[in-house]
Amino acid sequence: IEKTFIMIKPDAVRDRKIGEIVARIERSGLVIERMEMTTLERATVEEHYAHLADKPFFGGLCDFMTSGPVVKMVVSGLSAVAKMRTLMGATNPLDAAPGTIRGDFAVDVNANVIHGSDCLENAEIEIKRFFG
Ligand code: ATP
Ligand code: MG
């Protein structure tokens, strides 16, 4: 059983998609172990996206991620990391398949509705970072 870190981003909270996203996660057979709505500190976001610090969109990404509340979660289950990445769809909504969370709810790559850890190692780091 794996645990992964998931976050419903501020655009989806604003667009009242929390319920639909939570329903999709539960329908997939994964289990939501922890869930909390919170507004992130900029320093936390900068640390979370440190691997993108040299990208031109980094400032805008940090602005976006602190622009309103997010819903952070610990989700567990068999192959939870990969299963959530599949459920989420591609990073760029233009490439995300219909039926995926991003494919159905996201409009552009600057605001793509949901975050999910990209590997088990990062899942552990992110759960510690966001839940302590
Ligand atoms: P996340 O880490 O949010 O789950 P991801 O792992 O699919 O997304 P990353 O490469 O880690 O993709 O990028 C992190 C986030 O940075 C993306 O979700 C998106 O919000 C933003 N981002 C990535 N590429 C771009 C881009 N070309 N233009 C604008 N924003 C981008
Ligand atoms: Mg990522």
Image: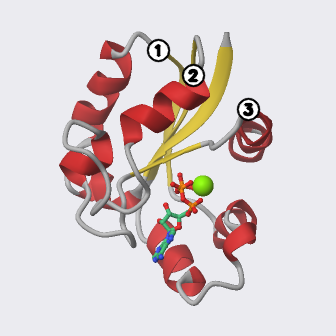
Q: Position of residue 70 (x, y in %)?
A: 45, 51
Name above or below for residue 45 compared with residue 53.
Answer: above
**Residue plotted at (27% across, 23% down):** 23
Name above or below for residue 94 compared with residue 127.
Answer: below
Which mark identifies residue 118?
A: none
Q: Which residue is mark 2?
A: 80
Query: Where's the C terminus, which quadrant?
Result: top right
Residues at discs 2 and 3 in contact (Cβ within 8 Å)? no
Amino acid at dot 1: Leu
Residue 10: image quadrant is bottom left
Q: Is residue 71 left or right of residue 17?
A: right
Q: CA distance from mark 2 to mark 3?
A: 9 Å
Q: Is residue 74 visible?
A: no
Q: Earlier in the sequence, mark 2 or mark 3?
A: 2
Q: Is residue 92 left or right of residue 120?
A: left
Residue closest to the eye, 98 or 14: 98
Q: Which residue is mark 3?
A: 120
